[in-house]
Image (cartoon, helix red, strand yellow):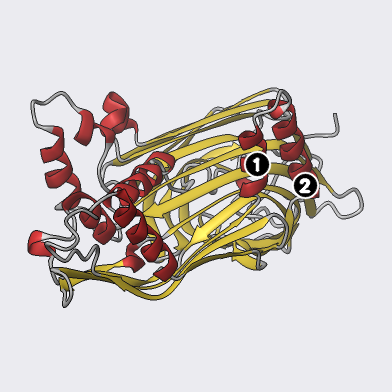
Amino acid sequence: MRGFLKTILIAVFGISSIHAQNRQLLYDFNEIPQALMLNPGMKTSQRWHVGVPMISGLFFQASTSGVTVNDLFADDGVDFTTKVQERVLDVMTRRDDFGSTSQIEGFNIGFRGKNRPDDYYSFGMYGEMDIISYWPKDLALLAFEGNGGSNIGRSFDLGDLSLRGEMVNVFHFGINRKVNNTLTIGARAKLYSSIFQFQSIKNSGSFRTVQGQDNIYNSIIVADMQLQTSGVKGFYEIVDEDTGTTRKDLTSLFTERVLLGGNLGLGFDAGFTHQLNPQTTITGSILDVGFIYNSNDVWNYTLEGTASTEGITVFLPEDIDNVNNDLWQDLVDEIDEALPHGENQSSYISLRPIKAYGSIRYDFGEGGRSWSENCGCAINTGDGANSDFYRNSVGGQLYMIKRPRGIQAALTGFYQKRVGRGLSLKTTYTVDKYSLTNIGLGLNLQAGPINFYVLGDNLLGYGNIADSHYASLQFGFNIISWNDN
């Protein structure tokens, strides 16, 4: 039992060593077209844009709210077992999490309506992987300390096991509309094609060892647990067959699911930008309100019911010659038969992790007319409320994401500086459960029609990345037209 639990814990920690989804540097960075993906209602000034395929938006983000790699593997003279006890088992709770998030943009295109210049349309495709696993505190204690000694009579909570992961390809189409000189709104429709998905998020039950009647101890398990998977078994079977065409078969299956051959789902984004006065702006958006219906290549594993065992019962001296491997095998068979586990292929619905952003921004330091004044669009026409170009912006942002164990939030303060008409810099300070010292820096460079941006988070942690609780990097290239040329 302890060996099995240790295997689970190592696997969970191994696949889930990084996590987070907040993209505070990109949000409300209006000069970057990809910011439309975080707020479909942001102000747009370009006539059209085209992302360079596969490199218009590369995003990688990492975090851990608990132990870091350096905590466990630093050459500090402390015994590894002591590190695990003092830096993991004694301090981490079931609210600590690990995970991974990455996104690669296949293509991203936007253009202003010819007959409706106040409307800006955008569409594209991107792939995303997101995995989160909470620290299973009681199961970790059971695996490393066992159920004997001081743990006799203790009830280990099986509900501590909670994890979720998916890889999905997303096709999207959005409309951004300038309602008037102070209000812009937008919405984006999404079609999801799942590559794989797994989740075990509503578990409950306990494992307890007490004094036995026919033997010294009696172990009792009461469980209502389920691991749901879709798309996983197809990849596993190809790898398990290990034929000469394994790589080709994996590529073929992956490509099929990327191109709408996986389990499908629907979702939407919505957002707005509202100018309270010429220098003060508030924004808000909600993203990935959607679901995926998992009906193909589904394989679920359940553990539901109650079972108990008192181990091997030996009567001496009659059974002195019968203590052999058959008795141990009989015990294994007995436990396997009594343990209420099963498999099924029932379809299920998985919800996308809903995210929300909000911000308030104050612009100051007039620099004359905007760099987009000759875009040939209607965005800057009217009473002039939107046409002033401010070189500085300062403000705050709020981010929230729905996770299996509740809402995770982050608060960000930012300052943005525009240098000339081709360079913008943005720096942020973010507070969340992962870090209290997260300082980020973003750069956007416009050289004629060529746009390049790079955004990096938690710069103080780059000195020793193994000891960092958070890291983020995003960059990309676009071609942007501001006029009729």
Can residue 300 be seen?
yes
The residue that label 2 is drawn on is 123
Q: Distance of mark 2 from mark 1, alpha carbons?
A: 35 Å
Position of residue 54 relative to residue 165, above or below, is: above
The three-letter code of the residue at mark 1 reads Glu
Residue type at mark 2 is: Phe
Residue appearing at x 43%, y 48% in the figure = 20
On the question of residue 481 being in view, the answer is: no
Residue positioned most to the right? 115
Please state if 66 lies on the left or on the right of 277 as rendered: left
Which residue is disc 1 drawn over?
237
> In front: 186, or 14?
14
Q: Residues within 10 Å of mark 1 (few under 14, many from 20)?
A: few
**Residue that appears at 13% across and 68% down:** 216
Q: Residue 446, located in which quarter of the rendered image?
A: top right
Kindly identify which numbered label has been placed on residue 278.
Answer: none
Tell me: residue 241, above or below residue 27: above
Neighbour tally class for label 2: few under 14, some 14-19, many 20 plus, Cα within 10 Å: some
**Callout 1 secondary element:** helix
**Residue 468 image point, x, y percent:** 29, 35
Quadrant placement of the C terminus = top right
Residue lying at 42% horizontally and 47% vertically, measured from the top left: 99
Measuring from the top left, give residue 189's x and y in whole percent: 74, 59
* Foreground disc of the pair 2, 1: 1
Q: Secondary structure at mark 2?
A: strand
- Label whose residue precedes the other's in the sequence (2 or 1): 2
- Tell me the quarter of the image containing the N terminus: bottom left
Toward the viewer: 13 or 213?
Answer: 213
From the top left corner, tell me how far across and down residue 361 is, in percent.
47, 54
Please say if 441 is above or below 64: above
